[in-house]
Image (spheres, coloured by chain):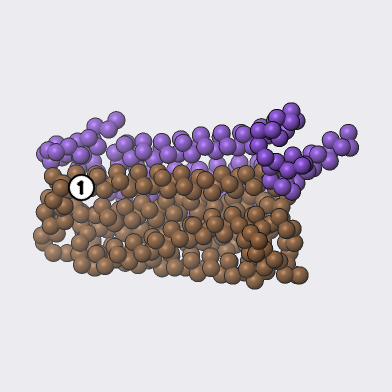
Amino acid sequence: MFKNFKKSLSNNPDNSTDHDKKNHGLLPVKLYLAIFTLLLLMIFVNIGIAHLPLPSLWKTIFLLSIALIQTILVAVFFMELIHEDKFYSFVFGSAVLFMLLFFTITLAELSGRDFFHKNEGIKILRGVDQKGNFAPGGPKLEHKAEENKEH
Amino acid sequence: MTDHDGHSAHPKYQAHHFKSMEQQTAAGKLGMWVFMAQELLFFSGLFCAFGFVRYMYPDMVSQAQSSMDWRLGGINSIILLVSSLTISLSVRSARSNNRSGTIKFLIATMICGFAFLAIKGAEWGMHMHEGYFPGKYFNPVHHAEIQDPLAHIFFGLYYVMTGMHGLHIVVGLGLMTWMLIRASKGEFNSENYVSLENTSLFWHLVDIVWIFLYPLLYLAK
């Protein structure tokens, strides 16, 4: 996977001829323009999605999916990962992986708070206000508390 | 373009601790990608904070987002996209030994960067005119659309996220000014282009951050 990278970092400059040829390949201007047009269209698609009568969650999912495709296009073609050594993709990809791990753990914990709250465990584990809210005045938890009172 | 610039393995731009230009280029690029990996993690903290606030205060965020003008955000998205194209073409020109092309596309990218900052500044001005200041300074005027006192949380994050992004634009413009000076001296060619390419990578990262900021702040209501 990292053969080319190792070659280019090696002490012997003669090793890197293949790598040079590969790296010096320029992408055609037409390709840049095609990717630009595609990305531009995606901006308009995103604006269109924002104006659709969809639930907020679905809208966010669609918008972020388009943004993800845009990011991949920018990274692969504009940042030229397509003909760069795979090691750079690995470095950047590992950051993306840890970012996703960070999001998953943090947001999963957030959605799990209701569970802990019901069992009163969270009040002992962490400092919360009298209403059991982490973020004082959080409408979500207050709303839930009101619902419970009604029942 | 002078004749000697086009020659391979020219020692003029090669630092003494590298064995070859290829080794120097690979080391420079690796450093940049590692830097960009940490930049991604830095911004992910802000995005995660936004996810938290949206989850905890869905109604407030939705109301606060009504103050965002999707047209201005859309124009800024297009401006950044054009700038991404022009900086890519600038690097391509450098690698094709086209000095005037490199300079022209760099200038075009910088114009886009300044236009982005001008529009963003105008947006901030509009929000502040309504009294939408961050944190404890949040004090909406009487006719302002958003009166929810909790909206200070959204605007706090909004200013930090777009402010950090704007700061990256300013840094990018600084780097491009430096690259412009070097390009005008004829320093970039098919062998020596890694500084320019790293600048372009940084600029693309700024574009990627905006690709996510625009839908989250302006569109996902």
Q: Looking at the image, which is closer to me, A115 or A119? A: A119
Q: Chain of mark 1?
A: B
Q: Looking at the image, which is closer to me, B211 or B15? A: B15
Taking the spot 33% from the left edge, 56% from the top edge, the residue there is B199
Farthest residue, direction top = A119
Q: Is residue B37 left or right of residue B216?
A: left
Residue B69 position in % (x across, y down): 62, 62
Is residue B27 shown to the viewer in this render?
yes
Q: Tell me where residue A149 sits by quadrant.
A: top right
Numbered label tally: 1
| Mark 1 residue element | helix
* Chain A shade in the render: purple
- According to the colouring, which chain is brown? B
Look at mark 1 in the image and give the residue it sits on. Answer: B24
- Image quarter hosting the C terminus of chain A: top right
Residue A108 position in % (x across, y down): 61, 33
Residue A26 position in % (x across, y down): 27, 49
- Identified by mark 1, the residue type is Gln
Farthest residue, direction right = A150
